[in-house]
Amino acid sequence: MPKLKLITFGCQANDLDSERITGLLSSEGYTLTEREEEADLILLNTCAVREKAEHKVYSRLGSFQVLKRERAGLKIGICGCVAQQEGEALLNRFPYLDFVVGPGQLTAIPSLLQAGTVRGVATARTPGYSYPVDAPVQRRSSIRAWVSIMEGCDHFCTFCVVPFTRGRERSRPAQDIVEEIRGLKRHGYREVTLLGQTVNSYGRKLTPPISFVELLRQIDRVVDGQMRVRFTSPHPIDVTDELAAAIAELPSLCEQIHLPVQSGSDRILHQMKRGYDRDEYLEKVTLLRARTPQIAITTDVIVGFPGETEEDFQATLDLMQQVDFDGAFMFKYSPRPHTEAERMPDQLSEEVRSRRLEQALALLNRLSLERNRAYLGRTVEVLVNREDAKGNTDRHTGRTRQNKIVHFGGEGIVDGSFVSVAITGATPLYLQGEMVRVVV
Ligand code: SF4
């Protein structure tokens, strides 16, 4: 049986795409291997959102050059957003690369593999291939599943490459999504995360249109209290009263939201073309907390956007404090090809961007620690999942409904069960505790 080494970079959408690629190639006889030395096919599923992620791809690819010389018949392919962004140029730059496949053309992989020594490219400009919505997904986890509900984005924020690599917004029919989740429930999954670049604009372009909240209600009926449901990432402008009410009311929906803010400065938000200002973002936060006081709110922040002054940066720090985020992905701005921001004047120096990132991270650490300390002495429901252990193998690990990681002790605990845990310790990144009882 041929062996596949699959290396995934980037977001959950890429994780899910990798599970689709595995499903697609397992029907071609491939089995997964962790060891590149024994692989017949090495695939890099790539991310172009940040310059650093893209450089990681190139350095990993460079390390396979020797292997390609030594192993006759070894094929190497690049898929994902870097493949879409760079296309054929990758074949010129890396002569030992066999093929390049964009995220919307994954069904091209089997035919490219059969092309013998012919090197191939399938990107959004190549007709005849598609995103394998119906391909069997070979999931890595048997507890937590990603379900794509929409692809692409219509927003064109000035720093973001996603609309260029994943295309315009397309939603899957609600019936297909609900059926997929029904199947996951049948197979014993305990948690599902609905994925989309702007997940809460789901369904507007469908005929007839259906709202994201209506989809959540249908899913809630199907899972019937037996699974947790999350979604990521929503766009702030589409956080409505109905969505806030759904989070508060639907039993399956977790009390957690990842709501990217990107900046706390109105001037920079305008330059980013985010479609909201600081006050509007804060109103959404107030709305969510009014309905669900225990909700955990995390975010994405970019520091060092072109033209960001010290005052703009301070406005971001100030907003972080005002919202009191539970956590955040913090990035220093990096110019991305094709984007408006790449061509903006006043690109800031590496030194300024790094210093601001350090400052923002220090603040985030303080805020997250305080938010997590508020859990001390409380008992929380945890879905046990070893995948979240990250080195803490001597203790059990899982996540709360607020998506907080908890490392805890206790006897007779099995992966995939819900347990109550008394919280005894807190760090900025996780909670610690002891199991009180098994819930289910
Ligand atoms: S909303 Fe903006 S940041 Fe998010 S995927 Fe679309 S263009 Fe990118």
Image: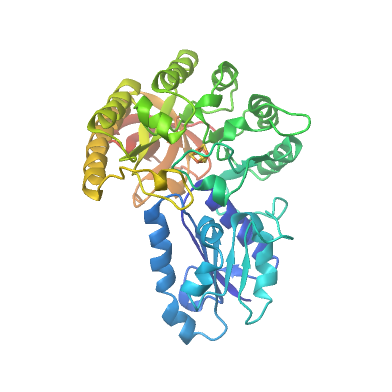
Q: Is residue 182 above or below residue 281?
A: below
Let me know if residue 261 appears in the view.
no
Is 327 on the left-hand or right-hand side of 197?
left
Q: Nearer the viewer, residue 410 or 58?
A: 58
Name the spot of residue 45 as percent of width and height, x first: 52, 60
Callout count? 0
Q: Quadrant of the rendered structure where residue 404 is?
A: top left
- Quarter holding residue 59: bottom left
The reply to whether residue 39 is in sight is yes
Residue 171, horizontal then vertical, whole percent: 68, 39
Q: What's the colour scheme?
A: rainbow
Q: What is the x, y in percent for residue 314?
A: 25, 28
Q: Residue at x 36, y 48 (%)?
A: 334
* Residue at the limit of the structure toward the right, as seen here: 208
* Figure check: 311 above or below 286: below
Quadrant into which the C terminus falls: top right
Question: Eyeballing the image, is 278 above or below 42?
Answer: above
Q: Is residue 399 left or right of residue 145?
A: left
Q: Position of residue 381 (x, y in %)?
A: 46, 30
Residue drawn where x is 55% and y is 22% of the image: 247
Quadrant into which the N terminus falls = bottom right
Looking at this view, is 167 or 203 the one in front? 167
Q: Nearer the viewer, residue 327 or 123?
A: 123
**In the picture provided, is 150 more to the left or to the right than 362?**
right
Q: Residue furthest top?
A: 290
Residue positioned 59% across, 23% down in the render: 251
